[in-house]
Image (cartoon, rainbow, N blue to C red):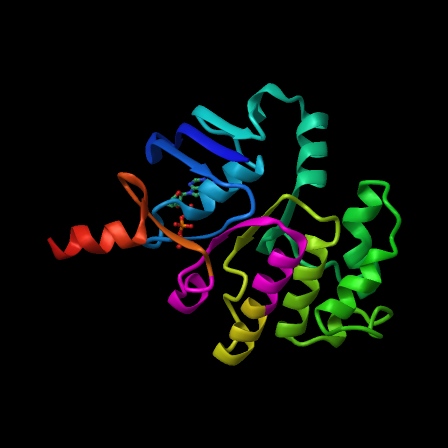
Amino acid sequence: MLELIELSKSYSGRPVLSNLSHAFRAGEFVAIMGESGVGKSTLLNLIAGLDTPDAGQVLVDGTPMSSLDDEAATRLRRTRMGFIFQAFHVLPHLTLRQNVALPLLLNREPAGRAEHMLAAVGLGGRGDDFPRQLSGGELQRVAIARALVHRPALLLADEPTGNLDPDTAAGILDLLRFEIRASGAGAIMVTHSRAAAAMADRILVLTRSGLNDASSQQKQERS
Ligand SMILES: Nc1ncnc2c1ncn2[C@@H]1O[C@H](COP(=O)(O)OP(=O)(O)OP(=O)(O)O)[C@@H](O)[C@H]1O
C-alpha cells in the first residue's frame, strides 16, 4: 500500500536521505529505528506528505503523492492516514470527545465512533473532560483513539511513548498494537525504544545506506 522509490532529501545542501527505496505491505506494523539525526522523522514527514522529497516518489496505493494537488493530498491524508506526532498534539480547548471526533468531522463522517474509541482506550465516560485534566499516558491514549477513529489504512507514529514511564509505555504499546490489529491498519512507528520496536511485526534500521531489516543488520555487524 506504501512504496518509497529512490527518495532523496537534503537540508541546506546536506543530504539526509539518499536514494531510499522500500515497500511496506498493507496491514503490517513496522518499527523504524536508527541513530539520532539519521533522518527518521524526516522520512515519516515525507511519507505523511508534510514535507516533499527533492527527488523520488512516495506511492500510496500506487498513486504518487507528488501527482496530487494540495486539496487531494489533504483528502488522502485525512481519509487514509492517522497520526501520532508531536506536531498533532491533543488540542487543549476541545473536550476529549471533540478531540477524538476531529478526523470524523473533517471527513464528514458521523461522530459516534469517537465515544467507542474513547471507551476502547479506557477513557469511556471521560468524553466531556479537557486535556488539562489528564496524565501524560492518558493523553497518549487520546492521541491513539484520535489517530484510529476514522479507520485509516496507515498509522504513522513518531515516538508514541517518548516521554512516558516504562510501565505506562508498555500499556500504551499493547493498546496501540491491539487497536491497529482490530482496525486492520498498517503502522509505521519511529522509535528509539527497543521495547517499543519489539511490539512490531518487523524492525527496520535507517542508516546512511537506507532502510535495512534489523535481523540482517545484526548479521552484518557480527560478520
Ligand atoms: N526542517 C529542517 N531544516 C533543516 N534541517 C533539518 C530539518 N529537519 C531535519 N533537519 C536535519 O535533518 C537531519 C535528520 O533529522 P531527523 O529529525 O529526521 O532525524 P531523526 O533520525 O528523526 O533524529 P532523532 O532520533 O534525534 O529524532 C538532522 O541533522 C536535522 O538537523
Task: Using the image, determine if residue 208 lies above or below residue 188.
Answer: above
The magenta region covers: 175-199
Indicate the quadrant containing the N terminus: top left, top right, bottom left or bottom right. top right
In the image, 103: left or right of 31? right
In the image, 122: left or right of 31? right
Task: Using the image, determine if residue 20 lies above or below residue 56.
Answer: below
User: Is residue 170 visible in the rendered structure shown here?
Assistant: yes
x then y, percent, for residue 56: 43, 24
Q: Nearer the viewer, residue 147 or 55?
A: 147
In the image, 215: left or right of 97? left
User: Is residue 94 visible in the rendered structure shown here?
Assistant: no
The reply to whether the magenta stretch includes residue 186 is yes
Q: Residue at coordinates 75% horizontally, 48% vertically from top-left? A: 150
Q: Residue at coordinates 41% horizontally, 64% vertically from top-left? A: 198
| Residue lying at the far top of the rendered structure | 67
Task: Using the image, determine if residue 223 lies above or below residue 175.
Answer: above
Q: Nearer the viewer, residue 180 or 156?
A: 180
x then y, percent, for residue 103: 77, 48
The reply to whether the magenta stretch includes residue 68 is no
x then y, percent, for residue 189: 49, 54
Q: Nearer the viewer, residue 60 or 41?
A: 60
User: How many numbered markers are drawn?
Assistant: 0
x then y, percent, for residue 195: 42, 69
Residue 96 quadrant: bottom right
| Residue lying at the far bottom of the rendered structure | 167
